[in-house]
Image (cartoon, rainbow, N blue to C red):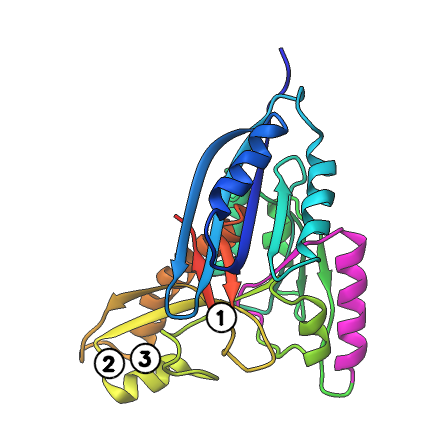
């Protein structure tokens, strides 16, 4: 019996007639079985976006060859597409500082095979979370950062990511601002968790800011990182109720639960290729 391989095709282009039929016919013509299709049109901007999941039993055309052909086709017009092969697992690195809750949650979900990726290394500017990584048998690398050595620290981190063949970088409460050059190198491949419901309370001490404003909800936002602090395209958000009885410490405690689940959801969606960035927004396919 032939082994089945799955692939996900993401397509983004100006809307026109026949796009779904075009790619469905292409897949069928090369022996692929289409298992899911999710498409929509942004009528305001005229943008088409689609996620198509296909299966191959190995008797049809090679998926890697199809990927090359599709991506070559996309270079000739305004279509942006990528065919991701499930047999090529996403290599993930987690950057953290001192807060353990998001790191622990991601490593536990990874251990339980909930995320569908390979967490290959944990990098931190402090050593305090090394026992957490070691408990889950994940390599830990300590890279100290200070203003005078930031450029060197980022160069070291880049080397670690290359060594471990990392595809996605997850900032699990990593309390350092990455340089514009670093961010450009990892465009749409860095996910950060911010402990507020953005765009409210960006920057430092958002729970204290929320307490001062007497908010009735506190939230968390997972977003792709760009050059603007906490301003990248939003992937996932969630909130939890609070009241005037809650202190700043209470808000932090409540917010940690939301941070964990929101970050894990964003990582899983990225790994499953359910995300498509269009301008300042992220389309999330169900």
- Residue assigned mark 3: 248
CA gap, disc 2 to disc 3?
11 Å
| Range of magenta residues | 149-174
Q: Which one is nearer the viewer's eye here, 5 or 205?
A: 5
Q: Which one is nearer the viewer's eye here, 265 or 216?
A: 265
Which residue appears farthest toward the top when viewing the image? 1
Pair 2/1: label in front:
1
Can the viewer see residue 263 in this picture? no
Q: Which one is nearer the viewer's eye here, 218 or 4?
A: 4
Near mark 2 (Cα within 10 A), the count class, few <14, some 14-19 or many ≥20, is some
- Residue assigned mark 1: 233
Q: Quadrant of residue 184?
A: bottom right
Dot 2 or dot 3: first in sequence order is 2
Pair 2/3: label in front:
2
Q: Is residue 36 above or below residue 194?
A: above
CA gap, disc 1 to disc 3?
27 Å
Mark 1 secondary-structure assignment:
loop
Q: Is residue 279 above or below residue 269?
A: below
If the image is split into quadrants, where does the N terminus sit?
top right
Determine which of the numbered discs, if any, sits on residue 215 in the image: 2
Q: In this image, 132 relative to 210: left or right? A: right
Q: Which residue is pictured at 53% across the width and 53% down the height? A: 270
């Amino acid at each position: 019996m032939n082994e089945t391989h799955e692939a996900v095709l993401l397509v983004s282009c100006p809307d026109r007639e026949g796009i779904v039929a075009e790619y469905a016919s292409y897949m069928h013509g090369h022996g692929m079985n289409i298992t899911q299709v999710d498409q929509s049109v942004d009528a305001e901007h005229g943008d088409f976006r689609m996620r198509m999941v296909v299966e191959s039993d190995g008797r049809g055309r090679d998926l890697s060859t199809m990927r090359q052909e599709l991506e070559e086709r996309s270079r000739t017009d305004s279509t942006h597409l990528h065919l991701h092969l499930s047999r090529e697992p996403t290599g993930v690195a987690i950057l953290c500082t001192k807060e353990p809750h998001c790191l622990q949650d991601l490593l536990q979900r990874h251990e339980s095979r909930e995320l569908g990726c390979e967490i290959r290394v944990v990098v931190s500017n402090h050593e305090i979370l090394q026992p957490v990584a070691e408990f889950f048998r994940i390599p830990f690398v300590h890279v100290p950062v200070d203003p005078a050595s930031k450029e060197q620290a980022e160069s070291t981190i880049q080397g670690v990511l290359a060594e471990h063949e990392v595809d996605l970088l997850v900032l699990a409460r990593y309390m350092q601002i990455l340089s514009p050059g670093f961010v450009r190198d990892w465009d749409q491949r860095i996910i950060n968790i911010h402990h507020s419901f953005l765009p409210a309370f960006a920057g430092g001490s958002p729970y204290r800011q929320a307490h001062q404003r007497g908010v009735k909800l506190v939230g968390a936002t997972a977003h792709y990182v760009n050059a603007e602090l906490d301003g990248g395209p939003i992937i996932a958000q969630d909130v939890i109720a609070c009241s005037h009885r809650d202190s700043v410490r209470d808000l932090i405690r409540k917010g940690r639960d939301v941070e964990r689940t929101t970050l894990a959801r964003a990582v899983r969606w990225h790994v499953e290729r359910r995300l498509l960035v269009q301008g300042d927004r992220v389309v999330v396919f169900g």
